[in-house]
Image (cartoon, grey):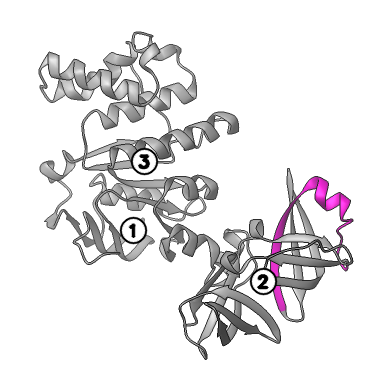
Amino acid sequence: MSAKQPLILAENIRQKYRRRVVLDVERFEVAEGETHALLGPSGAGKSTLLRVVGLLEKPAAGVITIDGRTVGHHSRSARMMMAAVFQKPYLFNGTVSANVAYGLKLRGVPAAERDRRVREVVESVGLDAMANTSALTLSGGEAQRVALARALVLNPRILLLDEPLSYLDPLIKRQLVADFSRILSDTGVTTVYVTHDQDEAMVIADRISIMHEGRFVRSGGVDEVMGLPTDDWVADFIGMEAPMRGRIVSIDEDVAEIDCGGVAVHAITPLPVGTDVVVGVRPEDVTLFEADGLPASSARNILRCVVDAVEPRGATARVSVRVNSLRFAASVSRASAQELHLHAGASVVAVFKATAVRVAAAS
């Protein structure tokens, strides 16, 4: 984060339901114009934190600061800075335009200004051709676009999105993820985005905080968080092996050689020689070849491995491999898994670029 005061700052937030602590967050901040995703499994506390930050729910303890000012649960001025979209859009019997205009009408915005703003935002979410269509006839994806437009038309400083795409079928969801990412980027609105979908978070977010049992277990930039697990739980959640540990033993032309239990891994890192580090590589960045069939490659990491396990995952397979005590994973297509005859005990060559390796100083 920059030294600039964050637009949203939540400190020492605790929440209890029936004497059970469901939220315990020391610090959560969101910079102006940033999309910060709260990612985690069901029951992790994501939606609870969003409701607390959005002043929809009073915490048992903690302080919320919005734009440098401490605010309470009933702060009307802070709430007027916010708009929200939830899992299921609640639309009334009227046109798309009438639904989008509803909040402006409640705020007493003059008709001419209201109509202009509605036209602009309806077009921005791709519904201009349906402006006069009954909202009750829309598909799920179209209805969620209306809900987003209804929030954006208020020109909020802060947008709260709570699993807005979770009920949509995969094809519509993929399209809306791309569209939501574009819209949030174009508007520049500061956004807190709750999701359990890792791909969704990686497309939409600037920063990600992974939550588990009411606490943050990993926070940072998208590549940092999703490419380098800090413990076994985070590794399992993001689909990687436990973090690899090693020490930087040399640097040649900005490429560091890291000794990971006798196995050399090459990476790009500013850390100096002698630093103890943790190392990670996303399964999608690892390519597997037959043990005797390696093609020409510019990749710095070419490792002869043994397959530990093959786990089918629909269109892909997650392949766990090891070299001595070093373990990592690769993601391959079903066709590739069959062509390579992958099974536990098989010999393969794993290839990945130095630029694909994430490195951090060991704590």
Residue 236 is inside the magenta segment: no
Disc sitting over residue 161 in the figure:
3
Give the Cα separation between the discs numbered 2 and 3: 41 Å
Does residue 281 sit above or below 187 in this rendering? Answer: below
Q: Quadrant for residue 240, please give it.
A: bottom right
Q: Nearer the viewer, residue 19 or 233?
A: 233
Q: Position of residue 300 (x, y in %)?
A: 67, 71
Residue type at mark 2: give it. Arg
Disc sitting over residue 16 in the figure:
1
Mark 1 neighbour class, 10 Å CA radius: few under 14, some 14 to 19, many 20 or more: few
Query: Which residues fall within the magenta stretch?
Result: 326-345
Give the Cα separation between the discs numbered 1 and 3: 22 Å
Which one is closest to the eye, mark 1 or mark 2?
2
Q: Residue at x 50, y 44 (%)?
A: 200
Quarter of the rendering occupied by the N terminus: bottom left
Q: Residue at x 14, y 19 (%)?
A: 113
Does residue 108 sit above or below 318 in this rendering? Answer: above
Q: Secondary structure at mark 2?
A: loop
In this figure, which residue is indicated by the disc labeled 2?
A: 300
Q: Position of residue 32 (x, y in %)?
A: 24, 51
Which one is closest to the eye, mark 1 or mark 3?
3
Does residue 363 sit above or below 134 in this rendering? Answer: below
Residue 232 relative to residue 165: left or right: right
